[in-house]
């Protein structure tokens, strides 16, 4: 069965409640409590089966996407076969996160600790303009989001909110 058929068959929002209501309309009103409980159990099992099919279809879709990306873009093991450039690319790719991280930490350190007209490491810094500060915030969010993930942004957002509130009071 294709992925799309599985997904189409799995999309049955509110199936159990609809099925129970429908069954109640067609079954005799004098159903025993045991029969009603059995009907509810069967519909719950049906719902669990449908949920399992949806989960399986999502896993299959993710595997197909991952393999398709590997086919189109290649994998890191493909780079090992290129004599000199392959290991260099792997090294640079592995160094990207620490280099960006330390660069942003340095810029943030300078931003938060340097008073106006101070020289740091031979570079003269002045007060950052509003546009420069906005650019630094955007750079921080981009680096945090793309290199460190959503969790890092969620952890830093309260700090940024407090910082903006403090600057607004000044």
Image (cartoon, rainbow, N blue to C red):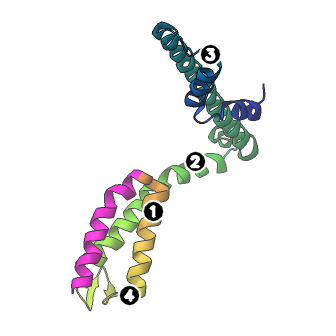
Q: Position of residue 73 (x, y in %)?
A: 71, 47
Disc 3 target residue:
27
Along the horizontal axis of the image, is 14 left or right of 103?
right
Give the number of the mark in front: 2 or 4. 4
Mark 2 or mark 3, earlier in chain: 3
Q: Is residue 41 visible?
A: yes
Residue 130, disc: 4
Bounds of the magenta segment: 151-170
Give the number of the mark in front: 4 or 1. 4
Q: Position of residue 33 (x, y in %)?
A: 46, 10
Estimate how packed mark 1 is, as few (under 14), some (14 to 19) or many (20 or more) residues with alpha carbons within 10 Å.
some
Residue 50 in which image quadrant = top right
Q: Residue at x 68, y 35 (%)?
A: 61
Estimate how packed mark 3 is, as few (under 14), some (14 to 19) or many (20 or more) residues with alpha carbons within 10 Å.
few
Using the numbered discs, state the Cα–Cα distance from disc 4 to disc 1 in whole angstroms. Answer: 20 Å
Estimate how packed mark 2 is, as few (under 14), some (14 to 19) or many (20 or more) residues with alpha carbons within 10 Å.
some
Helix, strand or loop at label 2? It is helix
Q: Position of residue 163 (x, y in %)?
A: 26, 73
Q: Is residue 114 visible?
A: no
Q: Residue at x 66, y 43 (%)?
A: 79
Disc 2 target residue:
90
Using the numbered discs, state the Cα–Cα distance from disc 1 to disc 3 in whole angstroms. Answer: 61 Å
Mark 3 or mark 4, earlier in chain: 3
Quadrant location of the N terminus in the rendered image: top right
> Is residue 156 shown in magenta?
yes
Mark 1 or mark 2, earlier in chain: 2
Mark 1 or mark 3, earlier in chain: 3
Using the numbered discs, state the Cα–Cα distance from disc 2 to disc 3 in whole angstroms. Answer: 66 Å
Give the number of the mark in front: 1 or 3. 3
Residue 143, disc: 1
């Amino acid at each position: 069965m294709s992925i799309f058929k599985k997904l189409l068959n799995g999309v049955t929002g509110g199936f159990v409640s609809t099925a129970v209501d429908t069954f109640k309309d067609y079954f005799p009103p004098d159903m025993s409590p045991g029969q009603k409980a059995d009907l509810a159990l069967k519909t719950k099992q049906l719902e669990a089966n449908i949920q399992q099919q949806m989960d399986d279809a999502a896993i299959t879709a993710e595997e197909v996407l991952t393999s398709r990306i590997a086919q189109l873009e290649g994998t890191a093991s493909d780079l090992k076969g290129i004599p000199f450039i392959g290991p260099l690319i792997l090294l640079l790719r592995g160094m990207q996160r620490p280099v960006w991280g330390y660069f942003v930490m340095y810029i943030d350190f300078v931003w938060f600790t340097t008073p106006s007209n101070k020289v740091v490491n031979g570079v003269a810094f002045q007060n950052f303009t509003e546009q420069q500060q906005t650019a630094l915030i955007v750079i921080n969010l981009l680096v945090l989001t793309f290199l460190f993930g959503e969790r890092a942004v969620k952890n830093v957002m309260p700090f940024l909110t407090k910082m903006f509130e403090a600057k607004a009071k000044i």
